[in-house]
Image (cartoon, rainbow, N blue to C red):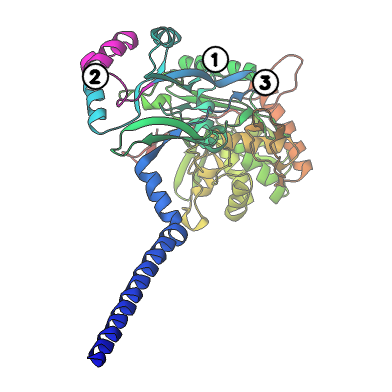
Amino acid sequence: MAFMRSQEGTQAKRRATLLALLLVCWLALIVGRLVQLQVFRHDYYRGESDRQTSGLIEIRAPRGGIFDRAGRTLALSLPVESVVVNPMRAPEPAVTAGILAPVLGLNQRQLEDKLAAAARQHRGFLWVKRRVSFAESQRLRGLRLAWIELRPESQRAYPKGTLAAHILGSVDFEEHGNGGVEQSLEADLGGRVGAARVIRDVIRRGVDSRTDVPAVLGKNLTLTIDERIQHVAERELAKAVVESRSQTGSVVAMDPKTGDILALASYPSYDPNLPVRTNEDREKRANHAVSVPFEPGSVFKVVTVAAAMEATSLTPESVIACGGGRINLFGRVINDHDPYGALSVSEVLAKSSNIGAIQIALAVGERNMLNYVRRFGFGRSTGVPLPGESAGKVRDLEDWGRTSIGSVAMGHEISTTTVQLAQAIAAIANGGMLIKPRLVLSEQRPGGKVEPAPLEPPRSIIRPETAITMRRMMEGVVLHGTGRSARLEGYTAGGKTGSAQIFDPVCRCYT
C-alpha cells in the first residue's frame, strides 16, 4: 500500500515538472516573440503603423526669382492661397458645397460629388480650389469655419509680359518649368519639395494634418541679359520680319569678351503669363535662336575668308579671278549676283561674291575648310542653358560631294543656329578666342550670398593677327560693301550680310 502511494507521488511530481517546463517554454516563446517584435522588427512595424495611420502630401517650394543683369525683375512667384477641406470633418457634402461654391465661383453639383467621393474613400485632405483670389480668401476667412483651411502657395508671374519669353519660358499649373531657363534650370529655381503628413484614425478617416518636412526656397537667378537691349532687339526684330514679309526671325547680342548674352530674341513670341492652349500656334514657342537650324548663306563667307588667312598665303590684297560672275565647278555651273572680273579678297567679302568665295575655298582645300568650320564651333551645341538647342549639321568629309567645297564656301550644305553664329563672330571680335555663351550671371539662395557663375576658359581658334585682319575687312563690308545700311555715325562697325536660298526637298534644288 505504501509502495503504491510512493509511485503515485513520483508520477505526480513528474507531471508537475513537465507542466512547469511547458509553462517555461510557453513564456520563453512569448518573451522571444515580444523581443522580436519590440527590438528586432520594431522599425518595420513602426513603419507599417505610420503607413496605415498617416500619409504624405507634397508641398512645393516657392520658385526663385529671375532678374536681368541690372537686377530688374523678369519672373517672380507671388504668394497666394489655396482652399483645403477635410471631408471627414466638414458638414454633409451638400451643405459644404452650398457654402463654398458661391464664394469660389465653382459648380455646386460638381463640388458636392467631389466631396462625397472623398468622404466615401475616408480621405482627410481635399483641394477645393487652387490659387484663389485675395477677395475669395478674405470672404472665406469671414465665414470663420474651422473645417476650411487656407494653405499658402505661390503663383508665377512675368511682369514684363512677352519680354524675353523664349529665354524665360513658363511654368505649368504645378509650377514645373516649361521651356526656357524655367525648364533647363528647374533644379535651381524649383528649390526642394516639402511634405505635409495627414493623420488618420483606426478606420482611416483623416483627423489632422501637419507640415512634416518644410519646403526649401528656390534660388534667385540673375541672367546676363539687359532688359533694355532685349526690348530693342525684340522691337527691331518684329519690325524687320514684318517689313521683309517673313514668318520667323531671331537675334542674339553677345559680349565677345565674356560670352554674356545681352539679348536673345525670337519671333513670333508669346506671353508666358498665359497657360498653354491645345490649339496654340507652336511656332510662337519655338526658340528660333537656339533650336531651329538654317543654312547661313553668305554670312558664312567670314569663316571661308578667315580659313584662307590662316591656311594659305592669301592676304586681303590678293587678287581673286571671279570669271565674269560664272564658274563651272566639276560640271555644276554657279552664277554670281554680279559679273565680277577680278576682286581682292577684301572686295570678295565686301561685295559678297559667290565665285570669289568659291575660289578662296578651293585654295584652302576641303580638309582645311572642314577643320576651320569645326574650329569655329559649327556642328556642335554651344552649351547655352536653354532646352532644345540644336547642334546644326556639319557633314564629315567622306560625305562631301565633288562640289560641296563650293557650297560650303557660300554657306550651303551646312546648317547652324543664330547663337552659333554669334559665338563664331565673337571669336573674330575678341582676338581669335572661341568662348562659351553665358546666360546666367549669378545665383543666390534667399538670405544667402551671391554666387557668380563661373567663366569657362576660352579656346584659341585663329591667330590674333588673323582676327585683326578679319575685323578690318568686316569694317569694309559696312563702309563700302553690302552692309552700308548698318553704318552708325561716330561708331566703328563691322559685319557681314547674308541671304540663303532655301532647299526644296520636292525638286531637290535651292529656290
Is 296 or 238 nearer to us in this picture?
A: 238
Asked whether residue 293 is in view, the answer is: yes
Q: Looking at the picture, which amino acid does disc 3 mark?
A: Gly
Tag nearer the camera, 3 or 2: 2
Mark 1 to mark 2 CA distance (whole Å): 45 Å
Amino acid type of the residue that numbered disc 1 sits on in the rendered structure: Lys
Residues shaded magenta: 84-110
Task: Report the front residue among 17 and 43.
Answer: 17
* Residue 79 x/y as whole percent: 51, 18
* Quadrant the C terminus occupies: top left
Q: Residues within 10 Å of mark 1 (few under 14, many from 20)?
A: some
Q: Is residue 349 magenta?
A: no
**Residue closer to the observer: 91 or 452:** 91
87 over 506 or under it: above or below = above
Q: Where, by quadrant of the figure, is residue 9 drawn?
A: bottom left
Q: Which residue is pictured at 25% across the width and 85% down the height?
A: 8
Tell me the distance, in whole angstroms, between the alpha carbons under discs 3 and 1.
14 Å
Q: Earlier in the sequence, mark 3 or mark 2?
A: 3
Labels 1, 2: front one: 2
Task: Tell me which amino acid carries mark 2.
Answer: Glu
In this orientation, which residue lies closer to the viewer: 508 or 82? 82
Residue reaching furthest to the bottom: 3
As drawn, which residue projects farthest toward the right? 465
Q: Which residue is mark 1?
A: 160
Give me the disc on residue 189. Answer: none
Question: Are the residues flagged by discs 1 and 2 in contact, CB closer than 8 Å?
Answer: no
User: Quick check: 129 above or below 38?
Assistant: above
Residue under label 3: 71
SS class of the residue under badge 2? loop
Q: Which residue is mark 2?
A: 92
